[in-house]
Structure formats: structure tokens, C-alpha cells
Image (spheres, helix red, strand yellow):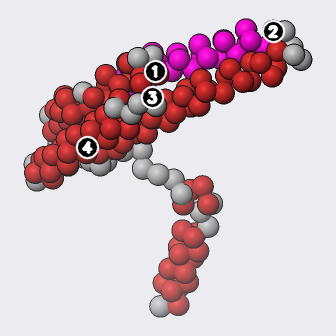
Amino acid sequence: MQTKRKSLLENIKKRNKKSIFEKMQISKKGQLTDLLLLPIIIFVTAVSLFFIYFVWQNIQGELSTNLQDDNPDAPAFLEKVSGGLSLFDNLFPLFLVGNIIFLVISAFFIRSYPFFFIIAIIFFVIAIFISIVIANVHQEIIVYNDEFKEYTSEWDTSSWIINRMPIIVVVVGVIVAIALFSKPSTPI
């Protein structure tokens, strides 16, 4: 009896001696809620980058005149920074495709059962509603705002993607459902 108790105590002590990093380790498998996060991540990234570009365009003129006295190469440098910031709009589709690829790969590693198909449909409908709201909010904040009209023509790629976010979520949802429910039932 005493040996059983001692061995149980030793096992408990061994389990509790994990390092902080071992305790905090996150599962490498995806979750069904990842589809809900896709439109939110895309929206936050696009709006953040647009506002960075907007602020930069507003301060660039004053910064150029103030720095030109100290350094004659400052306007050329500031123009290159402006070009680099406008490049983010062209790289935005790569960001979207990368997120979609990671979403599909993580969906492939989720164990799925037929019962979860109903839950997946519920998450799918919620993701569509979230993407519709995000597209409308983007229209109100960026596209229809008079202050931003001058800059929205330069950021047409990310605006095009966000305005079509419900369609993108439907297509990605179908791809994720195929990856989630068409694999063999044995875990990988």
C-alpha cells in the first residue's frame, strides 16, 4: 500500500516538473474557429496598412521640407519609403493566399466526425455573416469617407479583396470542408 502511494506521488511530481514552455505548448492542429478568424485578420491587416499609408502621405510633405535643409537626399529617400508602403497593397493577395493555405492545411489535421459537419455548417454561416459585416464596415470607413478618397485609388487591391470577402469566405469554407471531411477517418 505504501509503495503504491509513493509511486503515485512520484508520478505526480514527475508530471509537474515540466518546464513552462512544455506547459504552454499549443496544439499544432487547427480548429473550426479558424475560418471565423480569416475575415477578421484580413480586415484588420488591410485597414492598419491603409492607415499607415494615409498617415505617411500626410506627413511626408512636411517631413521632406524639414529634412531637406539637413540632407539633400532626404526627399529621394522619403519617396522610396512611400513607394515601399504602397507596395503593401500589391502584396496583400499573397497575404490572403498564405492565410488560406495555412487554414486548409490546419483543417486537414483536425480529426473530424460526421457529427461535426453540422457544427462546421454553423461556423460557416457565422463566418459568412462576419465577412458581410466586415465588407460593409470597410465600405463605410475607407471607401465612402471623403478624407480617404484621394488614397483609395492607390489601394484598390486590398479594397477589392475586402469588398468580395463574403465570396472568398464561401470558397474557402468549401475548400476547408473538403479538407476537413474528405480525408480517411484514421488519424494522421
How busy is the neighbourhood of tag 3: few (under 14 within 10 Å), some, or many (20 plus)?
some
Mark 2 or mark 1, whichever is nearer to me: 1
Lower position in the chain sequence, tag 4 or tag 3: 4
Residue 75 lies in the magenta-colored region: yes
Vertical comparison of 4 with 179: above or below: below
- For discs 4 and 1, the disc positioned in front in the rendered view: 1
Residue 49 at least partly seen: no
> Which residue is under mark 1?
150
Helix, strand or loop under label 1: helix
Task: Please give the label number shown on residue 133.
Answer: 4
Of marks 2 and 4, which one's residue comes earlier in the chain? Answer: 2
Which is nearer the N-term, disc 3 or disc 2?
2
* Residue 54, label in figure: none
Task: Please state which amino acid type lies under the numbered disc 3.
Answer: Phe
Q: Residue at x 84, y 9 (%)?
A: 72
Look at label 4 and name its amino acid: Val
Q: Amino acid at mark 2?
A: Asp
- Look at the magenta stretch and give its main secondary structure: helix
Q: Which residues are magenta?
A: 74-100
Distance CA(mark 3)–CA(mark 1): 5 Å
